Image (cartoon, rainbow, N blue to C red):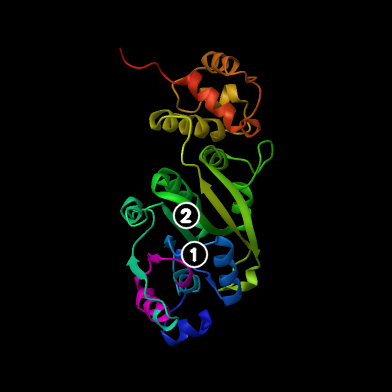
């Protein structure tokens, strides 16, 4: 693996801060991440932000095929060259933004669902996680690098300040565990904070229908939208067409004290609350 600094110099390129580009520079770390991902030759991997190929090459050597996405089309020729030099042939390179790319199209190539991997840019990492939740019917699991603070939020338990809207949404449909901590010195350009690798395993079945789930996510958003307020007040001001008295009745019917705050609720309590708040079907 050629160092990112050397590759960028040879190709007369610079990392784009606007795209959150911090390239993994330690080949040993890349191999460790792929090993802990537990890839098999039956896996199809969708890599987000393939960049200079630090992860893409070991992924391609371990998996059946890899679909390498990057929104920066300047890098695509370099990426292809690095993959071929590393002995990979089972790859497709696509210049695309993961927030617009049709994940279901890629999932058709994976009989058991995609494995999604990538070093996510901080400024859109939350949006990417939401996108994966929405597309999870075609995604079996994800192994992703986040800035350390973001990873700790995803892995948080109810009751703490790190537990938030995204954590609750993810815990409803997936099991989450940290795989590794990566020091900032292992990237170029060097970011200001360390990173963490997190595995997200989506459950094949969840207890709510798609419509019920969408409504529950609206409830979660409302609850955390004003997280310093009690649930009664947060819900009544959260765009759910609900006044304080109605919010209190629904909370009490779900067995939740109206003076609690969003970060104290388990996923099961959010499910119960959403069921109490779900509007009746049209006659």
Residue occupying image coordinates x 36% and y 59%: 97
Q: Which residue is mark 2?
A: 124
94 or 36, nearer to the observer: 36
Count all numbered tags in the image, as a single digit.
2
Residue with the most extreme bottom position: 10
The image position of residue 11, as x and y in percent, is 41, 84
The image position of residue 178, as x and y in percent, is 63, 54
Q: Which residue is mark 1?
A: 20
What's drawn in magenta, residue-wise? 61-83
Kindly check if marks 1 and 2 are in contact, taking CB atoms under 8 A apart as contact. yes
The image position of residue 192, as x and y in percent, is 62, 65
Question: Residue 44: within the magenta?
Answer: no
Q: Is residue 26 visible?
A: no
Q: CA distance from mark 1 to mark 2?
A: 9 Å
The image position of residue 145, as x and y in percent, is 55, 60
Residue occupying image coordinates x 36% and y 74%: 76
Question: Residue 74: within the magenta?
Answer: yes
**Mark 1 vs 2, N-terminal side:** 1
Q: Is residue 73 visible?
A: yes
190 or 50, nearer to the observer: 50
Q: Is residue 101 left or right of residue 178?
A: left
Relative to 111, does residue 219 appear above or below in the rendering? above
258 or 118, nearer to the observer: 118
Neighbourhood count class around disc 2 (C-alpha, 10 Å): few under 14, some 14–19, many 20 upward? few
Residue with the most extreme right position: 160
Residue occupying image coordinates x 53% and y 69%: 22
């Amino acid at each position: 693996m050629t160092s990112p600094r050397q590759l960028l110099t040879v190709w007369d390129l610079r990392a784009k801060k606007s795209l959150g580009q911090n390239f993994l520079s330690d080949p040993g770390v890349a191999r460790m991440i792929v090993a802990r991902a537990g890839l098999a030759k039956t896996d199809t991997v969708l890599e987000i932000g393939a960049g200079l190929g630090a992860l893409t090459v070991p992924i391609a050597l371990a998996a059946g095929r890899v679909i390498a996405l990057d929104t920066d089309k300047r890098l695509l020729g370099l990426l292809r060259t690095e993959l071929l030099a590393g002995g990979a042939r089972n790859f497709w390179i696509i210049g695309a933004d993961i927030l617009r790319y049709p994940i279901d199209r890629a999932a058709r190539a994976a009989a058991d669902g995609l494995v999604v991997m990538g070093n996510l840019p901080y400024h859109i990492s939350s949006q990417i996680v939401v996108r994966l939740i929405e597309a999870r019917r075609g995604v079996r699991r994800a192994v992703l690098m986040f800035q350390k603070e973001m990873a700790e939020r995803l892995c948080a338990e109810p009751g703490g300040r790190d537990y938030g809207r995204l954590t609750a949404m993810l815990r409803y449909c997936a099991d989450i565990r940290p795989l590794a901590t990566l020091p900032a010195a292992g990237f170029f350009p060097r970011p200001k904070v360390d990173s963490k690798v997190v595995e997200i395993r989506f459950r094949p079945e969840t207890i709510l229908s798609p419509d019920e789930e969408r409504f529950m996510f609206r409830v979660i958003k409302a609850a955390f939208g004003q997280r310093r307020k009690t649930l009664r007040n947060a819900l009544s001001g959260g765009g759910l067409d609900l006044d304080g008295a109605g919010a209190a009745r629904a909370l009490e019917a779900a067995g939740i004290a109206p003076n609690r705050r969003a970060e104290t609720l388990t996923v099961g309590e959010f499910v119960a609350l959403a069921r109490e708040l779900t509007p009746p079907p049209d006659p």
